[in-house]
Amino acid sequence: MAHDKKVKTISDARGLNAHDNDIRVVMPTPIAAATAEAVGRKPTPLVYSQKKEDQDAQFNWQQLEEISSTMAGVIAQTATEFQKTIDLVSQAGTLKDPARFDADVRVTMEDLTKFTDEFCKIKAKHEGCHGFIETAEERMKYLTVFEDYRAFGAFFQGTMHHKLMDFTEYALDAKDALVERAGTEENTTKEG
């Protein structure tokens, strides 16, 4: 008659004693909580068994959602850094090689669009998946998507790192031009 037992907590559902020292409760990160709320879900804590025999059952879709949220933040932050440099260069108005800068901006924006599209494709693979991984099919799907994120992250970081270095040079040149212009304007007002 164990199946008649009412489940009151997540730990009861997983067959864990809430007072057992072999469990760990993990609260959602602020990003995971905000993401859950944004899509109309209630952020929930995760309960893990720390017993060796239970560790195989620890995979859950929330982990992929957190990886996804982190990756989305990295993409957004990278795009923001590029935009700051573009704005700074526009404000400075002087470039050693404007054609090269325009080409770099165009290619970088195309790359960011392609990366964003690829990220969305990976995210769609686990859209709507919740809870713990319970079947071999779910485990295979989880591991495949996890590897997709890992490979995507490595390729994104490698590609964008070089572009960020180029854009840092543009930003430094623009700052130098702005400082020089401010110095020239200050001298002009003192003389006048």
Image: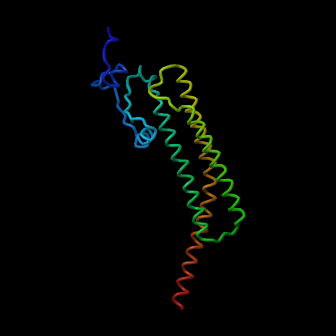
Q: Is residue 123 left or right of residue 46?
A: right
Is residue 155 positioned above or below 107 on the image? Answer: above
Question: Residue 117, image x and y in percent?
Answer: 62, 42
Q: Position of residue 164 (x, y in %)?
A: 60, 55
Quadrant in the rendering for residue 123? top right
Which residue: 66% across, 69% down? Answer: 95
Outermost residue toward the top?
1
Q: Say which of 179 and 3 sits in front.
A: 3
**Where 154 falls versus 81 (above or below)?**
above
Colouring used for the render: rainbow
Depth check: give the residue in front, 106 or 27. 106
Q: Is residue 118 above or below residue 186?
A: above
Answer with the quarter of the image where residue 185 lies: bottom right
Hey, which residue is sitting farthest left in the picture?
Answer: 19
**Number of numbered markers:** 0
Q: Residue at x 42, y 35 (%)?
A: 41
**Residue 130 in the image, given as x and y percentages of width and height:** 46, 29
Query: In the current view of this chain or complex, which residue is farthest to the right?
Result: 99
State the residue lying farthest toward the bottom. 192
Classify the position of the N terminus by image quarter: top left
Classify the position of the C terminus by image quarter. Answer: bottom right
